[in-house]
């Protein structure tokens, strides 16, 4: 049957793309682990990963205890931000939506700056986590503000994105105000935080991020058909049975959590949540059964490669990943858009 | 056979009453019903109300439904440009509320409607790259792939060329006869209504002004009062009724 054959070919092509992305991710992870002040060959890394007992204790500690949390954090945060951006673009039906453009990252930055500059704890418990907790609370507050606006009648998705951009400017102004009054050391800490850095990664932070990601993916996957249908436009999606209001709320809560947790642990990384989804969409189309894992893999790959580059550009120095992803990633993204490899929106 | 009856149905949109007290006899499956009325009369809102997207007073009684989702609704095209092939977009309409796995019968149904509408050649095209008329055919395919017993179609021929309009209306007419569907089509072409519809419902300024067999409803009086045109209905050489429009009706002083 022609239709079934056509569809099978489409599915196989997409599965192959997902496998290729996953393979590239594994390669990037191994390279990321190999690089650092002590350099290892890929075969040494693979041996240490598969048979940790068979390698020197020092190598095991460096790879497993020091580099692994950072490398896995890059992948987890990349996947989380990319999924968050992809679903924001879907539910708002706007290609500009992402945790960065909607002000969620800027909100997190403001929360972190309050803690870094003045020691203000928005949640006066878990003091050892005061910076990420502050960042998380402000990010969630920003998400709630966006959701509150989206409930108002007659508010279009364009209005919501404009509100997000307004929030970015407000938070940036507040950050500048904090820096104006803060000490020099505090200003340096705030600036460094907003550059986004994976060096803050630890195993506990990684587990928290991974847990949120692992819970979110099945919840979003379950809504795959409905989320795909949202790209047909509200009227069309409703006409084939999608409950728009409840779906938007459910997804916004999930992606707010994903984005907030990520930026609260690693700082502002603006590029991946916007571009990861677009790259996945160009490669895989809108069907969320493929787009969701594709966006996760593309996001994970972008940050993992970013992590590799951040160590390679100036040997001995780890450049903050937020800078790398923007400098290297945006030209690549522009190339993809301008070369029109496929329709992207 | 499925039937649909509306009793004192009303709806409001953003606080403004769009229509009220819309009542019909039980509209039986196996017929094509034209929903007629001037622009802004409330035809699309009536469809949204019947489909359950709007709340309001009144009753919608559906009898004889055997499908879990007996009604499908084809809204007017909204111009969205998703990165989806035609095949996927039709499959997507069918798969809502179902498991993620696509079954052989789902493929068979998509292929059936592609064949029905003679758009198999568009199977692999991106929806965003289609012309307005092609998109309208795909929209119709999405509605049919849900295998409804009652089908509400909002101006399904507005972007089609004349031969495609006749093809689609003929197909819809045939489906009512062969599959016992009740198809209600909102349309502006009264010629198509006279030619293809068994019955007509006419709404004007939020009220139902006529509902019954098309030839009894679409009369010179109704055309003057509702559409403000001087026109008459005459049989053509083949006996099919056709509309002869003479011009705008004189405006009341």
Image (tube, coloured by chain):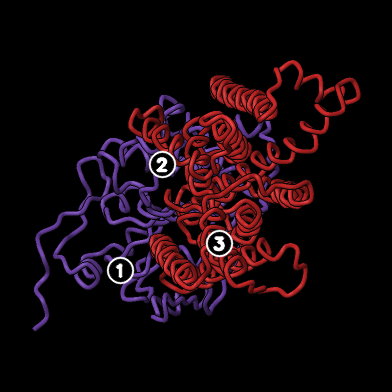
Chain appearing in red on the rendered image? A
**Along the viewing direction, whichever of B199 and A336 lies nearer the viewer:** A336
Q: Colour of chain B?
A: purple
How far apart marks 3 and 1 lie (CA) works out to 65 Å
Task: Return the residue nearer the eye: A122 or B80.
Answer: A122
Q: In the rendered view, tell whether residue A171 sits above or below residue B87.
A: below
Q: Which residue is mark 3?
A: A185
Q: Which residue shows up at 57% across the image and 20% down it?
A: A9
**Label 1 sits on residue:** B40
Is disc 3 in contact with disc 2, using a CB cutoff of under 8 Å? no
Residue A146 horizontal/vertical position (percent) = 51, 67
Task: Name the chain under label 1.
Answer: B
Label 2: which secondary element: loop
Residue A345's disc is 2
The N terminus of chain A, quarter of image:
top right
C-alpha gap between disc 3 and disc 2: 44 Å
């Amino acid at each position: 049957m022609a239709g079934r054959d056509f569809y099978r070919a489409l599915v196989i092509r997409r599965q192959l793309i997902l496998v290729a992305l996953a393979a590239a991710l594994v390669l990037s992870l191994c390279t990321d682990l190999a690089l650092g002040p002590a350099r290892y060959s890929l075969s040494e890394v693979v041996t240490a990963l598969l048979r940790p007992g068979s390698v020197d204790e020092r190598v095991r500690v460096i790879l497993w205890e020091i580099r692994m949390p950072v490398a896995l954090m890059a992948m987890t945060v990349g996947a989380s931000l990319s999924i968050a951006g992809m679903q924001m673009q879907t539910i708002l039906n706007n290609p500009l939506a992402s945790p960065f453009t909607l002000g969620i990252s800027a909100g997190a930055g403001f929360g972190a700056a309050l803690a870094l500059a003045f020691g203000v704890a928005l949640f006066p418990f878990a003091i050892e986590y005061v910076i990420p907790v502050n960042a998380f609370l402000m990010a969630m507050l920003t998400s709630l503000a966006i959701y509150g606006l989206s409930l108002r009648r007659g508010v279009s998705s364009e209005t919501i994105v404009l509100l997000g951009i307004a929030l970015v400017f407000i938070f940036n102004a507040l950050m500048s105000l904090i820096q104006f009054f803060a000490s020099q050391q505090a200003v340096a800490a705030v600036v460094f935080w907003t550059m986004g850095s994976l060096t803050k990664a630890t195993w506990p932070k990684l587990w928290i991020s991974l847990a949120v990601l692992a819970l979110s993916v099945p919840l979003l996957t379950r809504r795959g058909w409905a989320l795909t249908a949202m790209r047909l436009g509200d009227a069309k999606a409703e006409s084939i049975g999608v409950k728009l209001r409840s779906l938007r709320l459910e997804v916004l809560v999930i992606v707010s959590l994903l984005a907030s947790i990520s930026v609260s642990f690693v700082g502002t990384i603006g590029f991946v949540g916007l571009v990861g989804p677009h790259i996945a969409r160009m490669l895989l189309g809108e069907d969320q059964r493929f787009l969701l894992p594709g966006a996760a893999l593309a996001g994970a790959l972008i940050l993992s490669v970013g992590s590799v580059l951040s160590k390679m550009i100036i040997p001995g120095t780890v450049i903050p990943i937020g800078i790398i992803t923007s400098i290297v990633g945006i030209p690549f993204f522009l190339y993809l858009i301008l070369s029109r490899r496929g329709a992207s929106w | 056979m499925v039937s649909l009856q509306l009793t004192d149905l009303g709806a409001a949109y953003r606080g403004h009453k769009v229509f009220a007290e819309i009542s019909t006899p039980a509209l039986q499956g196996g017929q094509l019903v034209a929903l007629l009325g001037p622009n802004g009369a409330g035809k699309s809102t009536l469809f949204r109300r019947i489909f359950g997207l709007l709340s309001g007073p009144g009753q919608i009684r559906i009898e004889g439904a055997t499908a879990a989702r007996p009604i499908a609704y084809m809204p007017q095209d909204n111009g969205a440009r998703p990165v989806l092939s035609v095949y996927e977009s039709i499959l997507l309409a069918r798969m809502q509320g179902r498991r993620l796995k696509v079954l052989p019968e789902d493929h068979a149904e998509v292929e059936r409607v592609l064949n029905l509408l003679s758009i198999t050649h568009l199977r692999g095209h991106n929806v965003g790259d289609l012309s307005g008329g092609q998109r309208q055919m795909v929209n119709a395919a999405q509605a049919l792939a849900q295998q409804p017993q009652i089908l509400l179609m909002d101006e399904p021929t507005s972007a089609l060329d004349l031969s495609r309009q006749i093809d689609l209306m003929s197909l819809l007419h045939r489906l009512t006869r062969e599959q016992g569907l009740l198809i209600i089509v909102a349309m502006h072409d009264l010629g198509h209504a006279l030619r293809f519809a068994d019955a007509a419902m006419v709404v004007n300024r939020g009220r139902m002004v006529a509902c019954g067999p098309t030839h009894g409803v679409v009369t010179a009086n109704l055309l003057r009062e509702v559409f403000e045109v001087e026109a008459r209905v005459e049989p053509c050489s083949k006996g099919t009724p056709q509309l002869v429009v003479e011009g705008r009706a004189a405006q009341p002083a």
